[in-house]
Amino acid sequence: MIKPILFALSLVALTTATTVTAQNNRQRTRATANNTYYQRQNHLLDSVISRYIELDAQESRSSYMSGDNPADDLYEGAWGTSGVNANRVDVSEVPDSVVISCKGYVAPVIGSTTSHFGPRGSRNHYGIDIALRTGDPVGAAFDGKVRITRYDRGGYGYYVVIRHPNGLETVYGHLSEIKVFQGQSVVAGQTIGLGGSTGRSTGPHLHFEARFLGNPINPEKLFDFQENKAIADNYFLVKRNSFDWAYGGRSYRSSSNHRHSSSRGARYHKVRKGETLSGIASRYGVSVKELCRLNRLSRRSVLRPGQRLRCS
């Protein structure tokens, strides 16, 4: 009698186990199917998002390739060609914080940094210097459009300024030769000039600047010049940190009185032969208009060697 009972119990247990296993298998199959479905949906969504991002990038690029200027809304249509500072906005009027995309960055030249951003004697050095040999190709840091190609005997020498869709402008100074023209659209890495030692220079190097609304940012806050890449995909510009040279420095004007500079802490420059208003203005981080206002000059004024100009 016991054996039939044990057999019956074993049969029930086996049936139950088989049922549970079948249910688990069905659940596992259903879960796998659901997971596959969601993976396909996510892949489809990623493809759609990627396609839209790609389209946005193409539309952004095609807009200035076809005639518009990069970051035109940000600069409110300003496209001055009189000098580096032609479209400069006073620091006090720059937004407190801005996110700047650094995707697509290409190092303009591969070399060691020989001089950093910051004070240099009685003036500020608003970029970094990168060692190169005369004739080395210099490339555009991002896609963009050439705003200026010019020669500044007393400062940048042969130089190029490029405006980019991310709102930055990059400056390339002391070139031996310029390979692009004003208004030309360029792509990241494209040769825009050859390295040299023109202008105010003691030897072959590239003077490289990064500016936002005309105001210089230390390039080493955005780019790693040892690894030759952007530090991150995005740079979070915080005004007081990005423009620390202006806050508490000699060239900052408070928002309440930025149109009038105080005589306290004023800086002066003794004009050398061949120097220009735009070159001097660039060196001291002021606009040509402000330099003229401070010295009661016009843009057409002829500078005399030895002439003393107030620069802040």
Image (cartoon, helix red, strand yellow):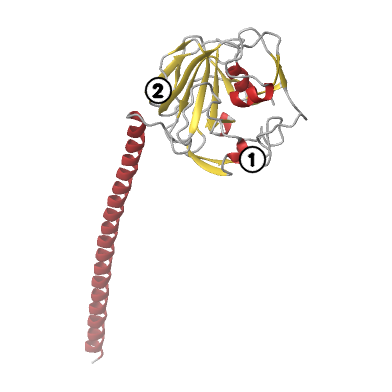
Please name whichever residue, 118 or 27, is drawn nearer the observer in this view of the structure. 118
**Tag 1 secondary structure:** helix
Give the residue displayed 40% in from the left and 31% down from the top. Answer: 69
The answer to which quarter of the image holds residue 19 is: bottom left
Res 240 label: 1
Place of residue 223 in the rendered image (x, y in percent of width and height, measured from the top left): 53, 31
Please name the amino acid that badge 1 sits on: Arg
Place of residue 7 in the rendered image (x, y in percent of width and height, measured from the top left): 23, 84
Q: Pointer 1 and pointer 2: residues touching (CB < 8 Å)?
A: no
Please name the amino acid that badge 2 sits on: Gly
Place of residue 291 in the rendered image (x, y in percent of width and height, measured from the top left): 64, 23
Give the residue displayed 29% in from the left and 47% down from the top. Answer: 47
Disc 1: CA contacts within 10 A as few (<14), some (14-19) or many (>=20): some
Q: Is residue 73 visible?
A: yes
Does residue 270 appear to the left or right of 199 in the view shown? right
Disc 2: CA contacts within 10 A as few (<14), some (14-19) or many (>=20): some
Q: Is residue 115 above or below residue 256?
A: above
Q: Can residue 287 be seen in this view?
A: no
Please name whichever residue, 245 or 290, is drawn nearer the observer in this view of the structure. 290
Quadrant location of the N terminus in the rendered image: bottom left
Reading the chain from its start, which is encountered first: label 1 or label 2?
2
Residue for badge 2: 183
Please name whichever residue, 78 or 226, is drawn nearer the observer in this view of the structure. 78
Does residue 276 appear to the left or right of 309 in the view shown? left
Res 23 label: none
Quadrant location of the C terminus in the rendered image: top right
Place of residue 2 in the rendered image (x, y in percent of width and height, measured from the top left): 26, 90
Q: In this view, does 45 lie above or below 243?
A: below
Give the residue displayed 25% in from the left and 72% down from the top. Answer: 23
Q: Which residue reaches farthest right? A: 264
Please name whichever residue, 133 or 87, is drawn nearer the observer in this view of the structure. 87
Task: Estimate the spatial distance between the alpha carbons at disc 1 and disc 2, rounded to whole Å.
Answer: 32 Å
